Image: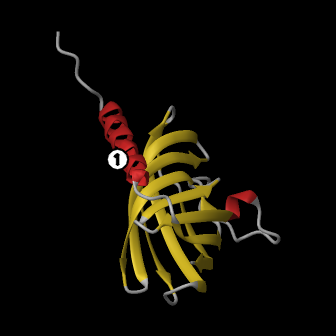
Amino acid sequence: MKHRLTSTTRVMKFVIGAMIAAVTGFSAPVQASSVALLLGPGIAGNGGSNPIGLPPGLTDIAVKYVTSGGSELTLSVVPGVLFGKRYVDGGFYTSLGAGILVSASGVGLGAYSSFGYVSGSGSGIHFNAEYTQTIGANGKGWTAPGAGRIGAVWSF
């Protein structure tokens, strides 16, 4: 009897392949071109986003590290730890990749896309706004955490 892959298994194989591709993108020179601190509510799948806490809680904070080659690492509680490639056009950018997702239903693997805007170019501190959406699977099924955040990026 042939073994048929479930849709979740196929998605997990795709996500693992995407994570490997994203991580191997970091084999380029690991010289940072920017580091960003972004604040905003994470959407963890527990009834929608909440207003940002004052002071911001851990789920409201994201740190982004972007290399000169466009590889991107996002560290946050929600939507998770993400590795990807950033594509820039003027002040606007989009990022695609994969990572470890965190939502109200638990931790899993998935893919993400984000788009954002950075006000200005060159070295210095600039305004940054970004929306990130993910989709993936965990032990309980599908999950899709995301976040809309604003903050500052330090380019050097």
**Position of 139 compared to 35: left or right?**
left
Asked whether 5 or 58 is in front, the reply is 58
Residue 4 visible in the snapshot: yes
Instruction: For residue 111, say whether it is visible.
Output: no
Q: How crowded is mark 1: few (under 14 residues within 10 Å), some or many (20 or more)?
A: some
Front position in the image: 30 or 49:
30
Q: Quadrant of the N terminus?
A: top left
Q: In this view, does 3 lie above or below 63?
A: above
Find the residue positioned furthest to the right.
55
Find residue 34 and report its horizontal and vertical position in percent.
55, 72
Q: Which residue is drawn at 58% across and 47% down?
A: 102
Which residue reaches farthest top? Answer: 1
Q: Which amino acid does label 1 sit on?
A: Ala
Relative to 59, say whether 32 is above or below: below
Left or right: 64 with respect to 89? right
Residue 9 horizontal/vertical position (percent)? 34, 31
Q: In front: 98, or 78?
A: 98
Report the residue marked by disc 1. 21
- Residue 27: give x, y in percent of width and height: 41, 50
Residue 64 picture location, percent across and down? 57, 65
Q: Depth check: 68 or 87 in front?
A: 68
Residue 54 in the figure: left or right of residue 4: right
Q: Is mark 1 on a helix, strand or loop?
A: helix
Q: Which residue is drawn at 22% across and 17% down?
A: 3
Q: Please tell me which residue is depicted at 56% across the width and 78% down the height of the picture.
A: 155
- The C terminus sits in image quarter: bottom right
Residue farthest to the bottom, as pictured:
120
